[in-house]
Image (spheres, rainbow, N blue to C red):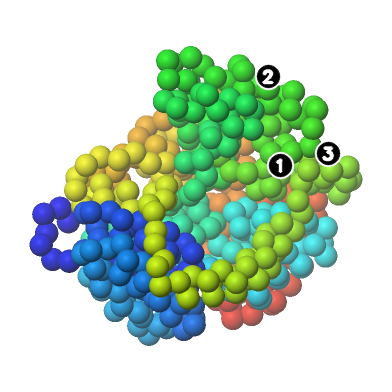
């Protein structure tokens, strides 16, 4: 890509995610090496696509002297044209939306005693989300192989490890999975502990799997280990007050390390905190059950107000965010190296403890030749074991998506930590049957 004179093309799949599209593509317009580009907006929702186009066109007029060319592509029949000739493809789709699919993912498991908080990464909800999303991603990945074989796919859709793992293994698309949680991990740890003075110049190493990457090392600007003081303050805070991050602080106490994604996420990645026989743990660890449906409802309401404001503002502007996407594109286009935390296959045993076909989250260097994952080595044994309980489910879900067999879905559910802890195999099978039926056309390929 470096040195080409043709206009750079960026395809955004799921452009109806207006706020996120604004952030990523607004960042592109703020970046000298990227701003003169063609932007292909693709979605299956005409109204949301038009709203995103309007907002991005306004930003383009107001801040982008070079003027990006923005084109819309509506519906599956036009997706291949949106992708044609792209240098970068950003994926932000949500198959099935809040209604009906997210509601189904929460309500049916609840009947079987499985309560969830977010349900987009692991658990029965994460399995179902992966199984309905992978076929859609596989379709457009094959289109990419045909019409933009050299493009780099930047995946932001969850469940990150399952989707990135599947597409990386079973297509020829070059891709990396990206998550917000790596960038903000140590900041979200240090600030509530009153250690803001340690933020500037800090050094850190994060590795593991998506949403359960471990802050393995953290030092101040002079190279001093910050973990002893972190452990002391976290234990004191958990013992003295209710707060939003109690599960992860308990990780620090029990496992010795902090992890990347929030406590409400991690509460459902293991069998320790949401337990029918120990309901008092929900209050003790301040766990927000059904959190994601609440967020969805609030976002739907909030978008009506926010959307009207954004759509009616002729002076709409944008300041470059911390999202990885534009920095990755800039590094590839200019050849100037940039470091990210990326989700990639564990090829070459980047993390020694995991299979090569697992999807891991490790430091990666980005330059003109693309994504270069770095070797981490072995994790502390308890951290590797925690990750493997999730990797087992991820790999079995990927296998079910490959075979399209219901019996393989059941096997993934049997090895899911919370389902295994709470349900009999017979009830797991009934729950899977009920979920597949309720999802209807979104899951019709499984039999």
Does residue 444 appear in the picture of this structure? yes
x%, y% of residue 268?
70, 48
Mark 2 or mark 3: name the one nearer the start of the chain: 2
Check the image and report above or below for 109 versus 322.
Answer: below
Q: Quadrant of the C terminus?
A: bottom right
In the visual, does 52 lie left or right of 81?
right
Check the image and report above or below for 92 versus 375.
Answer: below
Check the image and report above or below for 108 versus 367.
Answer: below
Q: Quadrant of the N terminus?
A: bottom left
Residue 244's disc is 1
**Residue placed under numbered mark 2 in the picture:** 232
Residue at 31% across, 62% down: 63
CA–CA distance in space, label 1 to label 2: 18 Å
Quarter occupied by residue 111: bottom right
In the visual, does 326 lie left or right of 356?
left
x%, y% of residue 166?
45, 58
CA–CA distance in space, label 3 to label 1: 11 Å
Check the image and report above or below for 302 versus 413.
Answer: below
Q: Secondary structure at mark 3?
A: helix
Q: Secondary structure at mark 1?
A: loop
- Pointer 2: residues within 10 angstroms few (<14), some, or many (20+)? few
In the visual, does 112 lie left or right of 100?
right
Give whichever of 407, 136 is nearer the camera. Answer: 136
Q: Are marks 1 and 2 in contact (CB under 8 Å)?
A: no
**Residue placed under numbered mark 3 in the picture:** 284
Mark 3 or mark 1: name the one nearer the start of the chain: 1
Residue at 55% across, 62% down: 130
Mark 1 or mark 2: name the one nearer the start of the chain: 2
Q: Are marks 3 and 1 in contact (CB under 8 Å)?
A: no
């Amino acid at each position: 890509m470096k040195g080409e004179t043709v206009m750079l093309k960026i395809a955004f799949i799921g452009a109806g995610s207006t706020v996120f599209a604004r952030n990523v593509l607004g960042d592109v317009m703020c970046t000298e090496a990227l701003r003169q580009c063609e932007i292909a907006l693709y979605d299956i929702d005409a109204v949301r696509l038009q709203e995103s186009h309007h907002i991005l066109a306004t930003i383009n007029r107001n801040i982008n002297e070079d003027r990006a060319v923005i084109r819309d592509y509506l519906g599956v029949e036009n997706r291949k044209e949106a992708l044609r000739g792209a240098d970068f493809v950003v994926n932000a789709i949500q198959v099935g939306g809040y209604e009906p699919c997210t509601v189904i993912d929460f309500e049916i498991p609840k009947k079987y005693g499985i309560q969830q908080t977010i349900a987009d990464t692991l658990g029965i909800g994460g399995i179902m989300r992966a199984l309905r999303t992978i076929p859609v991603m596989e379709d457009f990945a094959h289109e990419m192989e045909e019409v933009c074989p050299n493009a780099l796919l930047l995946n932001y859709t969850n469940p990150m490890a399952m989707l990135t793992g599947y597409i990386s293994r079973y297509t020829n698309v070059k891709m990396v999975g990206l998550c917000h949680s790596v960038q903000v991990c140590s900041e979200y740890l240090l600030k509530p502990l009153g250690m803001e003075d340690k933020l500037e110049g800090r050094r850190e190493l994060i590795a593991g799997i998506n949403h359960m990457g471990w802050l393995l090392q953290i030092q101040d600007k002079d190279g001093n280990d910050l973990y002893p003081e972190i452990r002391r303050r976290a234990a004191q805070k958990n013992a003295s007050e209710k707060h939003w991050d109690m599960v992860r602080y308990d990780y620090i106490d029990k496992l010795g390390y902090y992890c990347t994604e929030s406590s409400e996420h991690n509460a459902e990645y293991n069998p320790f905190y949401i337990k029918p026989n120990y309901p008092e743990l929900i209050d003790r660890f301040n766990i927000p059950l059904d959190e994601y449906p609440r967020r969805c409802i609030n976002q739907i309401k909030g978008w009506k107000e926010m959307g009207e404001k954004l759509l009616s503002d002729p002076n709409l502007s944008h300041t470059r965010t911390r999202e990885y996407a534009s920095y990755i594109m800039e590094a590839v286009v200019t050849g100037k190296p940039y470091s990210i935390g990326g989700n990639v296959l564990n090829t070459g045993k980047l993390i020694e403890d995991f299979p090569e076909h697992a999807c891991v989250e490790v430091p990666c260097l980005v330059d003109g030749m693309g994504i270069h994952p770095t070797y981490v080595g072995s994790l502390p044994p308890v951290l590797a074991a925690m990750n493997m309980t999730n990797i087992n489910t991820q790999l079995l879900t990927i296998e079910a998506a490959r075979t399209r067999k219901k019996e393989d879905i059941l096997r993934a559910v049997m090895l899911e930590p919370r389902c295994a802890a709470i349900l009999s195999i017979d009830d797991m099978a009934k729950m899977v049957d009920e979920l597949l039926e309720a999802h209807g056309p979104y899951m019709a390929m499984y039999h």
